[in-house]
Image (spheres, rainbow, N blue to C red):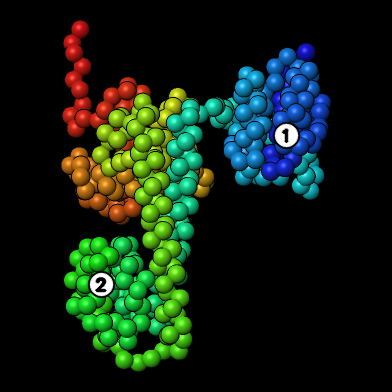
Amino acid sequence: MAAIWAGIDAGKTHHHCVAIDEGGRRLLSRRVTNDEPELLELLGDVLALGDEVIRGIDLADGGAALAIAILINHGQPVCYISGRAIHRASEGYRGGGKTDAKDAAVIADQVRIRRDLHPLRVSDEAVTDLRILTNRRTDLVADRTRTVSRLRAQITSIFPGLERALDLANTGPLTLLTGYQARAALRRIGAKRLETWLRNRKVIRADRLAGTAVPAAERQHTSLPGEELTAQLVHTPAKEVMVHNQQIDEVDKLIEARFRDHHTFEVITSMPGLGVILGAEFLAATGGDMAVFGTPDRLADGFGGVAPVPRDSGKISGNLRRRQRYNRRLQRVFYTSALFSIRYCEDSRRFYDRKRAEGKRHTQAVLALARRRVNVLWALLRDGRCYQPEPPIALAA
């Protein structure tokens, strides 16, 4: 019996598996429920077809999590191939339709002929927890952003002067909006009593906030349609934003506590610009094991998206463009940490200034810095040492 290749088109409730031999002939095609007994039965049936089985799957989490865990726990190698790659590759196979069986067959054939696919591995508990927590934080931040946008739109429709004066990223203005939203109410209470009201609710710089809100109310005397009802509705999203802020603070504490337990915490956070949150997102995205990517170039270019790729054709050369497929969250970590490092690290600032002097735009210079920092972070994780402004001098033999 020879080696065979199996492709799994994963879904939420069902998976479809197709196994092929080295000639591409189908040996098995089956649709199974996303349930452990059926997945174990499928595992045994596929193993009975060949001495060595190499599997591919088009999902790395979510509905495929159970199937992947079963395969890895039984010592079966499984590679990840993206759904976008499967969609493009399927255009070169016979048949114009799309079915789960065809997708699974394409996955199996791609695993058979390709040598650049990422093998899936079981992450340690800390990385898994950080992935869950950072995903939760991303959802909360997105919810807060949407709520703040709705809140600003409501205030602008009745009281644009107040919307311009308030910074809704702070707790004080949100506290103000839970009690006073209308122009008439702000004029009646006055700056002194409003300051007292804010101080009783532990608002920082209550005098400055009161001195901003009341004059804004005194400058607008025109009543707008729906002003009274809209002012009443502003109370709810203001409360929601405050709740989101509290939830994000709680998740941040959980992230920091879990991140500190990981052995790479000191190394990652020693890099200028990489704090607890960005460092935790980096660890959640990469797993902390740099051997998976092989080289820093593969991490930065193929996964992190911080380096351009050539787009040459015929006599046209030197044409670079931004990569289309990469991990957006990891690129944000690299880019944002590079921005912070410009502010706090002299070496990063000098590199950025040099790129700007060469004629690069701000974004290009920051991306160039981020690409260079990937090499540094890679070396630190490889050697297990913290960042130092001056590299250690090798001792003579």
Q: Nearer the viewer, residue 211 or 368?
A: 211
* Residues packed near mark 2 inside 10 Å, few (<14), some (14 to 19) or many (20 plus): some
Q: Which residue is mark 2?
A: 197
For discs 2 and 1, the disc positioned in front in the rendered view: 2
Give the residue type that dot 1 points to. Answer: Asp
Say which residue appears at 62% left-offset and 35% top-offset: 65
395 relative to 34, above or below: above
Give the residue type that dot 2 points to. Answer: Trp
* Marks 2 and 1, how far apart at CA: 58 Å
* Residues packed near mark 1 inside 10 Å, few (<14), some (14 to 19) or many (20 plus): few
The disc placed on residue 35 is 1
Asked if the residue at tag 1 contacts the one at tag 2, i.e. Cβ–Cβ closer than 8 Å, the answer is no
What is the quadrant of residue 190 in the picture? Answer: bottom left
- Residue 192 percent across, percent down from the top left: 19, 78
Left or right, 10 with respect to 153, comes to: right
- Residue 334 percent across, percent down from the top left: 36, 43
Which element carries disc 1, helix, strand or loop? loop
Say which residue appears at 45% left-offset and 69% top-offset: 236
What is the quadrant of residue 386 in the picture? Answer: top left
Q: Nearer the viewer, residue 164 or 339?
A: 164
Asked if one can make out residue 233 in the rendered structure from this viewpoint, the answer is yes
Say which residue appears at 79% left-offset and 48% top-offset: 97
Q: Residue furthest front?
A: 200
243 relative to 294, above or below: below
Of the 4 image quadrants, the one containing the N terminus is: top right
- Residue 277 percent across, percent down from the top left: 36, 43
Q: Residue furthest bottom?
A: 222
